Image (spheres, rainbow, N blue to C red):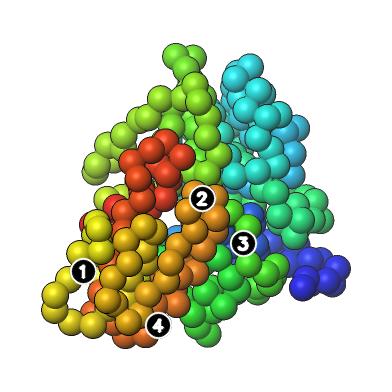
Amino acid sequence: MVNKNEIQQAARIVREGGLVVFPTETVYGLGANALDASAVRKIYALKGRPATSPLIVHVAGIEQAKELAAEWLPEAERLARQYWPGPLTIVVPKKSEVPDEVTAGLPTVGLRMPRHPVALELLRVAGVPIAAPSANRFMQLSPTTAEHVREAFGTETPFLLDGGQCEVGLESTVIAVTREGLEVLRPGMAEVSDAVSAGAEEGKAHRSPGQHQKHYSPKTRIVLVSRGHLPLEGKGAYLWLDYNSVATSKQRMPEKPEEYAAELYGALHKFDREGFDWIAVELPPDMPEWAAIRDRLVRAAY
């Protein structure tokens, strides 16, 4: 696990304009000083990420979030107090100190206080907010272990804090706070019952990460199936919930959404290494508690 010296070294790299990889409760993040435009551009370059996809800014607490927000409505305060630290990102109008590189040129910024102790200590010691998308190549499968990060970046892997396996396993819920109400820009495992869904506008800067039609994808083709009906050609693997099959390489997934989410990316990473022609996934039920998982699988299979 991570020691004090490693945290101090990572914090120094961030303050000096470099990149670090750190664990959160959702997935591993590829981080840089959110107030340093040139450092943020390094994130985009390493990931191969388009400039239309904004970054989430990680903060040490509510007060630091308010310092970056041009407007902090009562609903933002309520969400922060209810869900932070945790897997919820709050999108609010930004102050000019937040570079356009972070926000894809938009006037809003996504803010989150992570729940992982390593992430919180890094933020505390660094003394600056940290912009961080998932620590992978753009559109590929998100990392939930340090090994997944090394597989993605190889010799280009930045300084990495290994905090073990991520607890939640899916990217955060993203909620936009507006004067008209709350909008879900990306579903996650934190449910906000009084928020309504909002779609992304293709071809324009997205208000949230994770809005491209194809995203969260392993190199192996994902096929969504029902009742165990697998592709007839080639050799593949199968993730199943209720319907078993004759597939030789398979993994039964947990029946509880929280447990399923925590295992999903790890299972896909495992089968992606095997050189299969496809990975068939039984699509979970179309129910609110499964919305984030279905969102990731549909985009992975696009």
Graded by Cα atoms within 10 Å as few (under 14), some (14 to 19) or many (20 or more), the crowding at tag 2 reads: few
Q: Quadrant of residue 267?
A: bottom left
Q: Quadrant of the N terminus?
A: bottom right
The numbered mark, 2 or 4, whose residue comes first in the sequence reads 2
The numbered mark, 2 or 3, whose residue comes first in the sequence reads 3
Graded by Cα atoms within 10 Å as few (under 14), some (14 to 19) or many (20 or more), the crowding at tag 4 reads: few
- What SS does tag 3 mark? loop
- What SS does tag 1 mark? loop
Which residue in the structure is indicated by mark 3? 166
Q: Position of residue 15 (x, y in %)?
A: 72, 59
Graded by Cα atoms within 10 Å as few (under 14), some (14 to 19) or many (20 or more), the crowding at tag 1 reads: many
As measured in the structure, the alpha-carbon distance from the residue carrying label 4 to the one carrying label 3 is 20 Å
As measured in the structure, the alpha-carbon distance from the residue carrying label 2 to the one carrying label 3 is 17 Å
As measured in the structure, the alpha-carbon distance from the residue carrying label 1 to the one carrying label 3 is 30 Å
Query: Which disc, if any, is residue 273?
Result: 4
- What SS does tag 2 mark? loop
